[in-house]
């Protein structure tokens, strides 16, 4: 599993007009080829009367997968610039569809490359970029008297707390980056003088705003 990667925060749409041609960029987070193809089909249906529905996607959830289509535009002038916009932002697990309504004036190869690349970049910027970080959900069980010290340590190190459960003892659940679990365990033992129990659970990706 990837320890961390960049992707977009949410689906977004951005529009560019270039010499009377409309370029509508729609971007969406995807985690599989099936997700990407479903998204592309959805946009082709929505913009069924468009001149072109150009797309590109880059997925690394399991194995790296990239694909693009010029959808009738001259080879290399549409889908590839969209894919390059994705890569330039170092993004993964993203699909972009740029819809073009032809305005009557040809843009030429260089003009198409610029328009499709710029549209894709505008869509990415509208969606916002976030970091996904692989963490282990860890549970710290302790006496009530130790909670304050543990909370202070967790806060000072920037660990994200999922929940605090108050019962006979206190359970604090926090997301710990996979590379920092050993250090986290050491810090807990130091803060509690070895009197807390630590259990580790599932690995999950958490979202970090950029």
Image: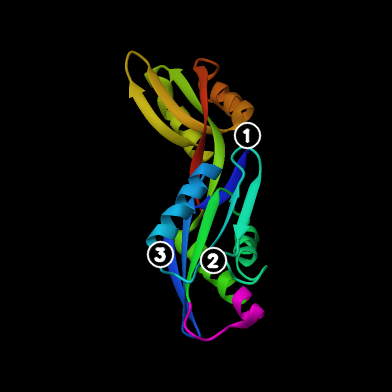
| Range shown magenta | 102-113
Magenta segment includes 109: yes
Can residue 40 be seen in the rendering of this structure?
yes
Residue at (37% x, 15% y) in the render: 169
For marks 2 and 3, the one nearer the N-term is 3
Q: Nearer the viewer, residue 79 or 51?
A: 51
**Of the image marks 1 and 2, the number of the one nearer the N terminus:** 1
Q: Which residue is mark 1?
A: 1
Q: CA distance from mark 2 to mark 3?
A: 17 Å
Q: Is residue 162 left or right of residue 179?
A: left
Mark 3 or 1: in front is 3
Residue 144 lies in the magenta stretch: no
Question: Circle 3 — which element?
Answer: loop
Which residue is identified by label 3? 47
Identify the residue under disc 2: 120
* In-image side of 130 versus 73 (left or right): left
Binning the other alpha carbons within 10 Å of mark 3 as few (below 14), some (14 to 19) or many (20 upward) gives: some
Q: Residues within 10 Å of mark 1 (few under 14, many from 20)?
A: few
């Amino acid at each position: 599993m990837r320890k961390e990667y960049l992707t977009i925060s949410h689906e977004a749409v951005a529009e560019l007009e270039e010499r009377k041609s409309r370029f509508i960029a729609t971007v969406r987070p995807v985690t599989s080829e099936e997700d990407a193809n479903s998204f592309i089909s959805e946009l082709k249906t929505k913009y069924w009367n468009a001149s072109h529905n150009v797309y590109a996607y880059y997925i690394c959830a399991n194995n790296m997968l990239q694909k693009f289509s010029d959808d009738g535009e001259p080879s290399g002038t549409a889908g590839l610039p969209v894919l390059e916009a994705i890569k330039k932002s170092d993004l993964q697990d993203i699909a972009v569809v740029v819809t073009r309504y032809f305005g009557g004036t040809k843009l030429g190869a260089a003009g198409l490359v610029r328009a499709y690349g710029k549209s894709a970049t505008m869509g990415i910027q509208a969606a916002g970029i976030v970091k996904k970080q692989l963490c282990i959900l860890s549970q710290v069980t302790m006496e009530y008297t130790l909670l304050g010290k543990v909370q202070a340590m967790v806060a000072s190190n920037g660990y994200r707390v999922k929940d605090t459960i108050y019962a006979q003892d206190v359970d604090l659940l926090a997301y710990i980056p996979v590379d920092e679990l050993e250090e986290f365990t050491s810090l807990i033992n130091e803060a509690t003088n070895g009197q807390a129990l630590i259990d580790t659970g599932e690995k999950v990706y958490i979202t970090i705003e950029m």
